[in-house]
Amino acid sequence: ALSHAHSHTPPHPHAHAPSPTHTHTHTRATHEIASAKAALEKAEELRKQFCRLEDLRNEINPIRVLHRAVDLAGIAETGPMYPMLGELSEQQAGVVGQAAQELKALDCGV
């Protein structure tokens, strides 16, 4: 008589151990997911750096703020604003200048 301790059930005919290729593909997919997650986190970090200036553009005027921000950050002399757009107030220029300089400092690693 055979004891139950030694009995062996044959494997299901469609069951098989994962192949090395399957394991490699799974590992690669896991790595790609992790890389994509890290890239999204980095993109979010970069997006947040622009939020202050973008909020000012939305609050005041996109064209006027960007035009003056480039000048106030010392990136380029943009000259006067077209008369139909008007200039920023001194208070607006101060806030925009600070935001633009902070953003430029991030880019320059200052």
Image (cartoon, grey):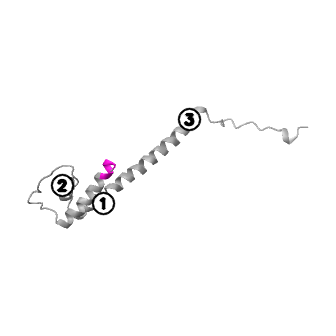
Question: What residue did someone put label 3 on?
Answer: 24
Q: Quadrant of residue 73?
A: bottom left
- What residue is rendered at 48% in x and 41% in y? 32
- What residue is rendered at 55% in x and 39% in y? 27
Percent coordinates x, y for residue 77 in the rendering: 15, 50
Percent coordinates x, y for residue 31 in the rendering: 51, 41
Marks 1 and 3 close (CB-CB < 8 Å):
no
Name the secondary structure under disc 2. Answer: helix
Q: Which of the pair 102/31 is nearer the observer?
A: 102
- Name the N-terminal-most of marks 2 and 1: 1
- Name the N-terminal-most of marks 1 and 3: 3
Question: What residue did someone put label 2 on?
Answer: 67
- What residue is rendered at 28% in x and 61% in y? 55
As displayed, is residue 55 above or below residue 78?
below
Main SS type for the magenta part?
helix
Q: CA distance from mark 2 to mark 1?
A: 16 Å
106 in the magenta segment: yes
Q: CA distance from mark 2 to mark 3?
A: 52 Å
Name the secondary structure under disc 1. Answer: helix
Question: What residue did someone put label 1 on?
Answer: 52
The residue range painted magenta reads 105-109
Q: Which of the pair 64/8 is nearer the observer?
A: 64
Q: Nearer the viewer, mark 1 or mark 3?
A: 1
Q: Nearer the viewer, mark 2 or mark 3?
A: 2
Q: The disc labelled 1 sits on which kind of residue?
A: Arg
- Name the N-terminal-most of marks 2 and 3: 3
Check the picture and name the quadrant holding the N terminus. Answer: top right
